[in-house]
């Protein structure tokens, strides 16, 4: 047992995600909103899914699917990907492995952010590479501590900032479509561009669902900007203003014909200036 646990304490891509404003909602809101929050947290387990990649060990020719580990506690989410089985499989090239991990993680992050925004939350986080044990309902290790510190001390705005452990690896940040560098020099995961398109739940009529989600999201953004400015809550205002600007910029980067087919006008998204 100890030997098995030691093997599972390994280098992993690890992300810690937090819902901004959760403490206020959990103590000072109505039961309907609380129920929506609870449904969101419970539903996160359905977002795990398969990694949709096959990893083959060349020595014994075994093929296995790789999926991330996902844990939730209170308003926190931990998502991790063990690097060893990916590097040892059919994706030994670090740049390709990073591309696949970041791409899959961004899909999960975007789905989480879209669901959270609809009920009034923004998401913020940190991501790193380090030793982690993440199995059997237990999350433990230096990577979790590092990711948490980045979320709580460095990210500031509703973004998932990459640690120096990742930023110092060129193959993880250079020519990676999921990664952008902010004006303060920090790298973070660009979930803003695809937020609109991944907002529609599976099985829905995409155009109708996207438009309905956007209408709700715009109303939430406008309400929070107005309330925080009126009440003088400058920290909260800065976060929502930053998000509104980045979200609108992300939508503007989408294909204009696609936006037209969805009936979406980027200027309908408030951009606080």
Image (tube, rainbow, N blue to C red):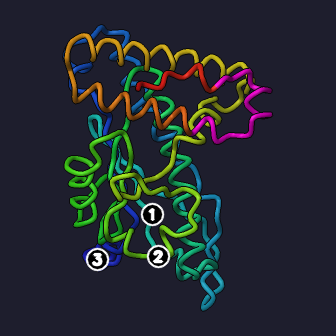
Q: Find disc 1 in the rendering and name its residue.
A: 81
Classify residue 23 as left or right of residue 175.
left
The reply to whether discs 2 and 1 touch (Cβ–Cβ < 8 Å) is: no
Magenta segment boundaries in residue numbering: 250-265
Q: Tell me the crowding category of disc 1: few under 14, some 14 to 19, or many 20 or more residues within 10 angstroms, Cα based.
A: many
Judging from the image, what secondary structure is the residue with disc 2 in?
helix
Q: Position of residue 116 (x, y in %)?
A: 43, 29
Look at the magenta stretch and give its main secondary structure: helix
Classify residue 94 as left or right of residue 149.
right
Counting residues from the start of the chain, the first of labels 2 and 3 encountered is: 3
Counting residues from the start of the chain, the first of labels 1 and 3 encountered is: 3
Which numbered circle lies on residue 73? none
Query: Looking at the picture, does residue 157 appear above or below residue 184?
Result: above
Q: Nearer the viewer, residue 72 or 192?
A: 192
Q: Position of residue 101 (x, y in %)?
A: 53, 63
Give the residue drawn at x 61%, y 88%: 60
- Residue farthest toward the front in the current orientation of the protein: 273
Judging from the image, what secondary structure is the residue with disc 3 in?
helix
Give the residue drawn at x 26%, y 35%: 74
- Residue farthest toward the bottom in the current orientation of the protein: 59
Q: Tell me the crowding category of disc 3: few under 14, some 14 to 19, or many 20 or more residues within 10 angstroms, Cα based.
A: few
Residue 227 picture quarter: top left
Q: Find disc 3 in the rendering and name its residue.
A: 6
Is residue 262 covered in magenta?
yes
Residue 147 picture quarter: bottom left
> From mark 1 to mark 3, how far is it between C-alphas?
16 Å
Q: Position of residue 192 (x, y in %)?
A: 52, 40
> From mark 2 to mark 3, how far is it between C-alphas?
29 Å
Q: Nearer the viewer, residue 35 or 260?
A: 260
Q: Nearer the viewer, residue 206 or 5?
A: 206
Give the residue drawn at x 31%, y 68%: 164
Which numbered circle lies on residue 170? 2
């Amino acid at each position: 047992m100890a030997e098995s646990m030691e093997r599972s304490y390994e280098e992993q891509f690890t992300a810690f995600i937090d819902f901004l404003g959760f403490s206020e909602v959990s103590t000072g809101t109505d039961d309907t909103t609380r129920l929506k929050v609870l449904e969101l947290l419970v539903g996160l387990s359905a977002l795990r899914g398969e990694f949709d990649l096959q990893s083959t060990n060349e020595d014994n020719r075994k093929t296995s699917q790789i999926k991330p580990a996902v844990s939730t506690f209170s308003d926190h989410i931990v998502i991790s990907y063990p690097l060893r089985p990916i590097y040892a499989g059919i994706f030994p090239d670090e740049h390709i492995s990073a591309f696949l991990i970041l791409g899959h993680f961004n899909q999960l992050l975007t789905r989480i952010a879209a669901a959270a925004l609809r009920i009034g939350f923004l998401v913020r986080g940190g991501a790193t590479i380090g030793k982690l044990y993440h199995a059997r309902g237990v999350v433990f290790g230096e990577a979790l501590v590092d990711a948490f510190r980045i979320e709580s001390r460095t990210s500031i705005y509703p973004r998932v900032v990459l640690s120096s452990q990742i930023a110092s690896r060129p193959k993880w940040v250079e020519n990676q479509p999921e990664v952008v560098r902010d004006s303060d020099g920090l790298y973070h995961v660009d979930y803003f561009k695809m937020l609109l398109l991944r907002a529609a739940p599976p099985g829905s009529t995409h155009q109708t669902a996207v438009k309905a989600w956007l209408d709700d999201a715009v109303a939430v953004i406008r309400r929070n900007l107005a309330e925080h400015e009126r009440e003088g809550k400058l920290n909260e205002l800065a976060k929502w203003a930053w998000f509104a600007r980045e979200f609108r910029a992300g939508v503007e980067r989408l294909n204009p014909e696609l936006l037209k087919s969805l009936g979406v006008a980027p200027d309908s998204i408030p951009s606080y200036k």
